[in-house]
Image (cartoon, rainbow, N blue to C red):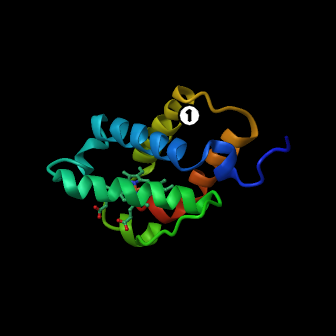
């Protein structure tokens, strides 16, 4: 069988990406440094944000999913995300990919996509 053409398919499709996003957000919320950004949020609001993240990642990796959220610059503006926050975030991305055993070119593609959003997010 040939290798699936989209990164979305190679990662395992919607369910796999949803599981990765859920794991990542759980880690971010529990982080001492980053948790401030999710503190005092209601469950429904958190679930909507998680759904937007799943949709964003599915869409960006070539899946048949529409992303209806805001762009990265608009949605993170004013959070004062600095370089230290970014490093902590990437630590959780890498730990999440370790947890799911993603390696090789597909892992590199995911990390490089996340890194490509950095200049829209880090503002302090
Ligand atoms: C240090 C890094 C980051 C922090 C602290 C952070 C934090 C947050 C928070 C608190 C929200 C909820 C915003 C709200 O309720 O209005 C959010 C939304 C979102 N984030 Fe991030 N984020 C980070 C990096 C990223 C990255 C790298 C991506 C994508 C690869 C991403 C994708 C999204 C998406 C798709 C949303 C939903 C946008 C919307 O509400 O329209 N975030 N982020």
Residue at 55 percent across and 30 percent down: it is 100
Residue at 43 percent across and 56 percent down: it is 53
Task: Note whether 53 is above or below 2 in the view shown.
Answer: below
Which residue is nearer to you in this view: 37 or 100? 100
The x, y position of residue 81, in whole percent, is 37, 55
The x, y position of residue 62, in whole percent, is 65, 61
Residue at 23 percent across and 58 percent down: it is 45
Which residue is nearer to you in this view: 80 or 116? 116
Residue carrying label 1: 97
Number of disc labels: 1
Quarter of the image with the C terminus in it: bottom left
Task: Kindly tell me whether residue 124 is visible in this rendering.
Answer: no
Which residue occupies the extreme right position in the image? 2
Estimate how packed mark 1 is, as few (under 14), some (14 to 19) or many (20 or more) residues with alpha carbons within 10 Å: some
SS at badge 1: helix
Task: Kindly tell me whether residue 9 is visible in this rendering.
Answer: yes
The x, y position of residue 72, in whole percent, is 46, 66
User: In the drawing, does residue 55 fall left or right of residue 35?
Assistant: right
The quarter of the picture showing ligand 1? bottom left
Which residue is nearer to you in this view: 10 or 113? 10
Q: On the image, which quarter does residue 64 sit in? A: bottom right
Which residue is nearer to you in this view: 99 or 17? 17
């Amino acid at each position: 069988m040939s290798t699936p053409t989209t990164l979305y398919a190679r990662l395992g499709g919607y369910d796999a990406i949803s599981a990765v996003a859920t794991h990542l957000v759980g880690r971010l919320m529990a982080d001492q440094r980053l948790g401030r950004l999710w503190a005092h949020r209601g469950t429904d609001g958190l679930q909507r944000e998680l759904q937007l993240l799943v949709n964003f990642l599915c869409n960006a990796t070539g899946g048949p999913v529409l992303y209806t959220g805001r762009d990265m610059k608009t949605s993170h503006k004013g959070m004062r995300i600095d370089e230290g926050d970014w490093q902590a975030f990437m630590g959780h991305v890498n730990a999440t990919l370790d947890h799911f055993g993603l390696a090789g070119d597909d892992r590199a593609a995911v990390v490089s996509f996340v890194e490509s959003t950095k200049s829209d997010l880090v503002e302090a």
